[in-house]
Amino acid sequence: MDRQRRVKQAWTIARIELRRAFFSRRAFWVYGLALFPAVIFFFYNLSIQIRRSSLQSGSLTTPALIDSIRIGERDEDILARLGKTKRDYRWQSNIRVRDKEEKSGITTHKIDPAYEARYVRLNIMVPTCSSDRTTRIYEFEVYGPDGATNLALHRPVTGSTPCSADEGPEKAVNGSVAGGIKDRWCSHEPRSYLQVDLGEPRPIGSIVIRHASAGGESAEFDTCRFSVQATNDNKIFATVVGATGTRLVEEITWHRNLVYFDGRREVRLSFTDGRLTAKNEKLLVDFEEDRKVFAGVFQFFYLRLAIFFGCLGIFMNLFRGEMLDKTLHFWFLAPARREVLLAGKYGAGLIASSVIFAFGTLACIAVLLSGHSSAEVQQYWQSAGSAHLFWYTAAAVLGCIGYGSVFVAAGLLLRNPIIPAAVLLAWESVNGFLPALLQKLSILYYLQSLCPVPAPVDGDMPALLRLLLAPAAPASKAGAVIGLLAVTAVVLWLAALAIRRIQISYSTEA
Amino acid sequence: MTSLSVVFDEVSKFYGEVLGVNRVSMNIPPGITSLVGPNGSGKTTLMNLMTGLIHADAGTILMRGISPRDPEKLMRITGYATQYDAAPRWATGFSFITTGLLLFGYSRSEAEQQAWKALEQVGLTDAAHRKVAAYSKGMRQRVRLAQAIAHDPEIILLDEPLNGLDPLVRAGTIELFRTWANRGRHVILSSHVLQEVDLISDQVILIANGMIVAEGKIRDVREEIQEHPSQFIVRCDDASRVASLLFDEDHVTEIRLNEDRLGLLVMTRDRERFSRSIGRIATNGHVIDSIIPADENVDALYEYLIGEGK
Ligand SMILES: Nc1ncnc2c1ncn2[C@@H]1O[C@H](COP(=O)(O)OP(=O)(O)OP(=O)(O)O)[C@@H](O)[C@H]1O
Ligand SMILES: [Mg+2]
């Protein structure tokens, strides 16, 4: 009899308090939190819609044509078959490479007409085109106009200080390149030179120089810039080969991207030098992907932040708001037990927060589904859809139950809402690190176990963040519901102890 | 019989270090009882203790046999108009009282009927549907009164109920108190002006500094205060001479000389005649350095209640 009356009283209190819970100015931002994901998904859908209509005008083709595209096809062929697309992007890339025509590391320099001289001199202006400063010449050959015999072979030769005793200038006229690095003339001197004495003035028709790569070293070490001079008296020099080097040419690659759309897929075709090298297909709207995104948003934003702070706003306000307004004593002067008052107020907060956040969840899912084809949605609906919907809503409501109890208790025990919020948020965040027993004292632990789709935790997140976000070892769904209700019951029992001891003292409250 | 009284037994309440009330014992029978004392004397504290809004640190309180810790029972028979001048933002006078009544288990129509009756009693029917927040001070005072009595309580606690009422309304309100008292209810109100309540009360309880100074029917209290001997410390050069002069006065009941012979403690039954005597002695050439009342509680209360009223 008494019990029935108390239940009725609590319900009466809850009905009166619903106004405060739903419309309190202090808690209006709760609506913003609850509807935020739905709004975000709405704008996401809108952006997809805009992209679709823009793709449809000017890039539309058929699925069959897209499937017919093969790697290696020419861009013009594809354009002819699929039609022009608005999304046609071309650009070119240039890189400097050694002339492919040139045999590796060997340069030949014609001297026409032939020049007669006794001494021939190789001046190194820039030893290599890289940062290396060492000159490496494997062979320096001088030919007459007939080009038959190497006039420099085994002739006396002078030059800049060699790198070592067995890398002297004579190695450049020994007729061989095959003996490894001991078969070269090498010098560290800047602007080094090499001079061959042909014995008597001879007509010179061409010069062949074998650089580093001719001897098996990296082409990077081939001489970058040099010139050849000739003289008879070692006083007057004629430049027979003007400043030149191993030849670099620009290599130009032509790139082209074409984008087509078949109503579902967006295909990006990448061409290099006119041939198709890559074909990337992407679904414009990917239902599976979107559901994963929703799972992440729900766990990381909704459960952890929106419901957490929403309940903070609604439930802390139930008692604290009345203390600030100096109206709490009206409740204490009613013919009701303090516990009944607690039950009534908690009930009001629970109804309000559950309605707000369940609605927020449903709204978000509805917006999400609205962006997809009805066939896909129907199929989802028939498979996992309704179970997902149920568990997401249940998690939201249970979140309100759990966090609500904590914040109604905090509102009775503490003056400043910031402190319990910060402590609790920290507690819930480090939950993953706690020993198993303590984990069970966290609301989030149970809520995460209820979520039907695991939240995507990216492999390349920082390890610490991953630990924070990754759910602790999940409990079974039934276990999670029972565990959460048990934690709530304990917290509410503490709140009941607290409310019995509360005294009206407005003066010191503000 | 005790179960029909409001009984305090050695009740103390401290706000941290600050004294609220100290070892208060009293027995209030039905009828109009006024708690009278200056600001900060502990009137509100007593009423809050009676209704369980605050809890006593020591002692026991029984309201017609019910502990203030049991609001479910107590608040059915108790109505309390507090001094806190606040009402929910959303409330009109009518909805405010109706809402409160719903918690008593009344149906909505019953509650509305009762609320209307209460508003009629305090003469607020015209403003019943306006927001309480927009009421004048006197109207808010009356709506709190109506809220306290809407469920026909047996014990009616009113914290400074006459504050801010114009003479016409005040007369009507006092008449209400009388009606309720005649029906055997407790009407306990507080005031800091003795004149305001002495004619209407069956009993007056004088409080100062958290203690009951005098208690009883109004005439008794007056006499008790008048005749309460006052003590003064008089500092002067020739204390023994002044002492002998004072001793001739018949209102002086006792004189004690200080050891340093520079001061004396005088106990008198009549403060006014005492001050006249001191004046005479001073004009006769005796140097009086200072007169310090030694019994501040009662002295201050006397000044406050009687002195101001004249
Ligand atoms: N919440 C509180 N915290 C600290 N001290 C308090 C509190 N409420 C009252 N007091 C102190 O207790 C004493 C009694 O206060 P109380 O409000 O009972 O006086 P009162 O007789 O009702 O005064 P008034 O005529 O101004 O209403 C005062 O000294 C007051 O400062
Ligand atoms: Mg007061």
Image (spheres, rainbow, N blue to C red):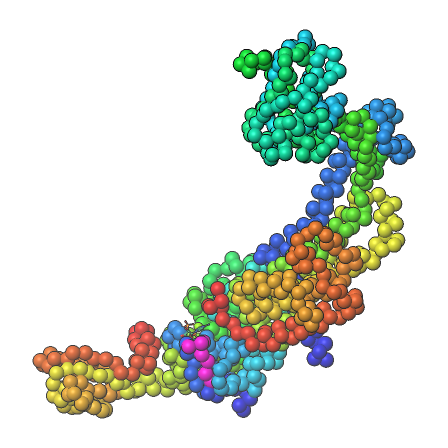
Q: Looking at the rendering, which quadrant does residue A249 occupy?
A: top right
Spot occupied by residue B269 in the image (x, y as percentages of width and height)? 26, 87
In this picture, residue A84 sits left or right of residue B236? right
Q: Is residue B247 left or right of residue A472?
A: left
Which residue is pictured at 66% across the width and 59% down the height?
A: A468
Residue A252, position as x, y percentages in the image: 72, 24
Quadrant for ligand 2 reads bottom left
**Residue A181 image-quadrant placement:** top right
Between residue B81 and residue A379, name the one nearer to us: A379
Q: Residue at x 43, y 80 (%)?
A: B21
Query: x and y percent of residue B79 in the render?
Result: 55, 75
Observer-nearest residue: A477 or A131?
Answer: A131
Query: Is A183 or B122 nearer to us in this picture?
Result: A183
Q: Is residue B125 magenta?
A: no
Residue A92 visible in the picture? no
B242 relative position to A285: left or right: left
Can you see residue B158? yes
Magenta range: B11-17
- Main structural element of the magenta stretch: helix, strand or loop? strand
Q: Residue furthest top?
A: A113
Is B13 inside the magenta-drawn segment? yes
Residue reaching furthest to the left:
B285
In this rendering, the answer to whether A234 lies above or below B181 is above
Residue A182 point in image, percent of width and height: 67, 34
Q: Residue at x 46, y 68 (%)?
A: A507
Q: Where, quadrant-wise, is the N terminus of chain A in this rendering?
A: bottom right
